[in-house]
Structures are given as structure tokens and as C-alpha cells.
Amino acid sequence: MSQETSPRIDKWLWATRWCKTRGEAADACRSGAVKKGGQKVKPSSTPRIGEVIHFRKLNLWRTFKITKILQTRVSATLAEECYEDQTDPEEIALWQENRKRSALEKVHGQGRPTKKDRRERARIFGK
């Protein structure tokens, strides 16, 4: 097969906008964030129509079925036509709820101080 008819999986992930860059897609494959049939996928493997891919992004495993092979990056609306998202909607909702909860439960005093924190510190310590 020529490269025109069968691109690499990292190129397909980039073209369908699952990854921002092709390098990010290749790194995801190498790190085990892309699986096919429970096995890690190499960046150079070829995607085929009808295959089910598992992709981890931001600690959420997404499952999708490939419906169209792309050679170049396309708009988001066209990219959505190239796969069927088979991820459980309840799992996505739970993941979103956990993300919101963790953002709300940020422990005060961790990370860089805010302008308000700096002013309070200056008021107390005179600096």
C-alpha cells in the first residue's frame, strides 16, 4: 500500500484533531495512550476503517471507531465525520464532574499567590 491510501496512526490522530500536533500524537502512541485490541500502538501503524481505537487524553479513556481515513488536517466538523465516538456518556459526565470538583477544591496557599494574597501578606508583615 502507498502512503497516499494508508497514513500513519499518529498522522490520523492529528488530522482528526484528537492531538494538537503530530509530535504530541506520536508521543501519545509511544507512551501507551493509544491502544488497539488492548495492545499499545506504534506511531507508524496504519489505521483501518472499522477499527476500534482507545485513546487516553486528560486521564479519560475515549473509545472510537474509525469510519474514514484522512491524509491532511481538516476542520473540526469534517473531522467528526471520520470516527464514531463509542465512549460511555455516563463516564464522560463523571469525568467532567470530577474535574469541576477538583478545580473547586483547590487548597488555598498552594501554587503562586494571588494579588489579594500578596496584599494581605504586605499588610500583615509590612512589606
Image (spheres, rainbow, N blue to C red):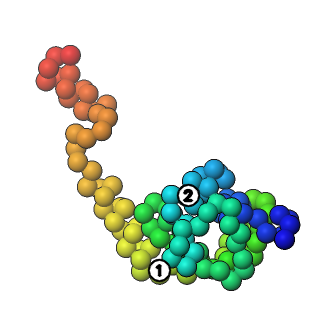
Q: Residue at x 45, y 60 (%)?
A: 58
The quarter holding residue 105 reads: bottom left
Q: Residue at x 31, y 58 (%)?
A: 102
Q: Earlier in the sequence, mark 1 or mark 2?
A: 2
Residue 82 placed where, x, y %?
71, 74
- Foreground of the two, 95 or 60: 60
Q: Secondary structure at mark 1?
A: helix
Q: Is residue 28 above or below residue 2?
A: above
Q: Using residue 14 as the reference point, say whether residue 104 is left or right of it.
A: left
Number of the front mark, 1 or 2: 2
- Foreground of the two, 85 or 125: 85
Quarter of the figure that contains the N terminus: bottom right
Which kind of residue does numbered mark 2 sit on?
Answer: Arg
| Alpha carbon distance from label 1 to label 2 | 27 Å
Residue identifier under label 2: 30
In the rendered structure, are the residues bearing label 1 and label 2 in contact, judged by CB atoms less than 8 Å apart? no
Q: Residue at x 34, y 66 (%)?
A: 98
Q: Secondary structure at mark 2?
A: helix
Residue 54 placed where, x, y %?
54, 73
- Foreground of the two, 54 or 117: 54
Q: Is residue 74 visible?
A: no
Residue 69 placed where, x, y %?
76, 72
Could you tell me how many numbered marks the image carries? 2
Quarter of the figure that contains the C terminus: top left
Q: Is residue 38 above or below residue 109?
A: below
How would you rate the neighbour count of disc 1 (Cα within 10 Å): few for under 14, some for 14-19, many for 20 or more? Answer: few
How would you rate the neighbour count of disc 2 (Cα within 10 Å): few for under 14, some for 14-19, many for 20 or more? Answer: some
Residue 90 placed where, x, y %?
42, 80
Which kind of residue does numbered mark 1 sit on?
Answer: Pro
Residue identifier under label 1: 89
Q: Using residue 6 as the reference point, say whether residue 77 is left or right of it.
A: left
Q: Residue at x 20, y 29 (%)?
A: 120
